[in-house]
Image (spheres, helix red, strand yellow):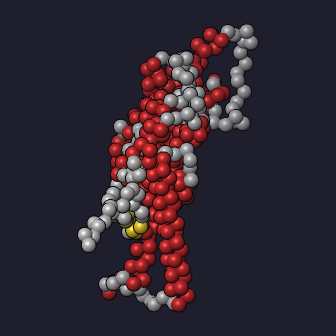
Amino acid sequence: MDDFIKTLSEIKGNKISPDLIGSIITRYASIWLPELAADESDRPAASSGNPAESVTHSWTKKRFIIESVVGILPPEKDSVPTDFLLRILRAAKVVRVEPACLFELEKRVSRQLDQASLKELMIPSFSHTSSTLLDVELVLRLVGSFLNTEEAARGGAAVGKVARLVDSYLAEAALDSCLALPEFVSLAGALPRYARPIDDGLYRAIDTYLKAHPGLSKQERKTIWSLIDCNKLTQDACLHAAQNDRLPVRAVIQVLLWEQSRLANKHLDWSGTLSGPRSPAELPGRCLSKRETGFQQMEIKKLKEEVLRLQSQCMAMERQIEKLSEKKRGPFLSWKKLGISGFKGHRIAEMEQGNEVGIGPYLVKTKVRGRTPNRRKSMS
């Protein structure tokens, strides 16, 4: 090791690029520690040593090699692959290197977290005090350090890559029945809202967690659903959520109403395209053919049918909730108590004393339960 460090210092004096220096160190470390190689097929055979070597002596030698390699890594970002840093971090946690060495490795990984792979990020928990299979606290620290970097502050594509990586990691970690809800929520909520343009990956992770933890209370299910933004769910995810009996009732109603409002907006857009007033700059270059017009009208008809179907499902859900809550809170259930008082330009109005309930752009006739008022009897 001393000879290698001396030779490497001479090479650095010749103004060699940091990437080349990093590749030399990576290759050297993989020879002494075969578990650091990228693929098993590329891993060289371990150097022959004393068969009677004790485990303590073997760990001491590995600890010395890891600490020496970390000490000579180039300071430039991207000079060493992120996956190699994760593999050496995993080996460092096994042999329990010095805390300063672990801190340096975590700092380097966090700067390049957007380049990490899910396979290498799934580092087991080697702590006796942790009950989880994966080291979730490590990933939480890496994400927190990444958010403090300049690249994360710019809010570029790297933040989106880390968000997708975290969602995939959560989907794997959620299978662990020992993963507590606060740990799951902390990691899922560590990234800002803008980091996820689409919440489908997070929804899959939440659904996996609900499957692996069927004993969650109603309040815990509400807590985990609060991580989701219905506006960022695709149509397929909304369809799955609307039929998911593991979600709280509030979540199902939110998804149904959001999908209804989205379809209604799309219907209005189609209607405005066909019949709405246009400025001369918005006029098409040619008139639509009869075939194209007929196709658009068929699409609008399908959208109307889909809106009506979702509306009927929503009203059926409302009636079921009314039946469940009739004994405790009377025949009416306020939509505002469900936390779904508004959706993007749509209003949910409830008239407790009337006979109409407005949901979005639609009015639904409902019968008012209870005693009907007595009419004034004639004196004649």
User: In the drawing, does residue 140 fall left or right of residue 2?
Assistant: left
* Residue 207 x, y percent position in the rendering: 55, 44
221 is higher (above) or lower (below) than 368:
above
User: In the drawing, does residue 92 fall left or right of residue 189?
Assistant: right
Position of the N terminus, as image quadrant, is: top right
Q: Is residue 379 visible?
A: yes
Q: Residue furthest front?
A: 380
Looking at the image, which residue is at 61% across and 15% down? 59
Looking at the image, which residue is at 43% across and 39% down? 223
Looking at the image, which residue is at 37% across and 57% down? 371
> Can you tell which quarter of the image residue 93 is in?
top right
Give the number of marks: 0
> Can you tell which quarter of the image residue 23 is in?
top right
* Residue 148 x, y percent position in the rendering: 35, 37
346 is higher (above) or lower (below) than 295:
above
* Residue 345 x, y percent position in the rendering: 33, 64
* Residue 356 x, y percent position in the rendering: 37, 65
Nearer to us in this view, 86 or 265: 265
Nearer to us in this view, 180 or 354: 354
Q: Is residue 115 visible?
A: no
119 is higher (above) or lower (below) than 132:
below
> Can you tell which quarter of the image residue 45 is in?
top right
Q: Residue furthest right?
A: 51
Looking at the image, which residue is at 45% across and 63% down? 260
Position of the C terminus, as image quadrant, is: bottom left
Nearer to us in this view, 303 or 98: 303
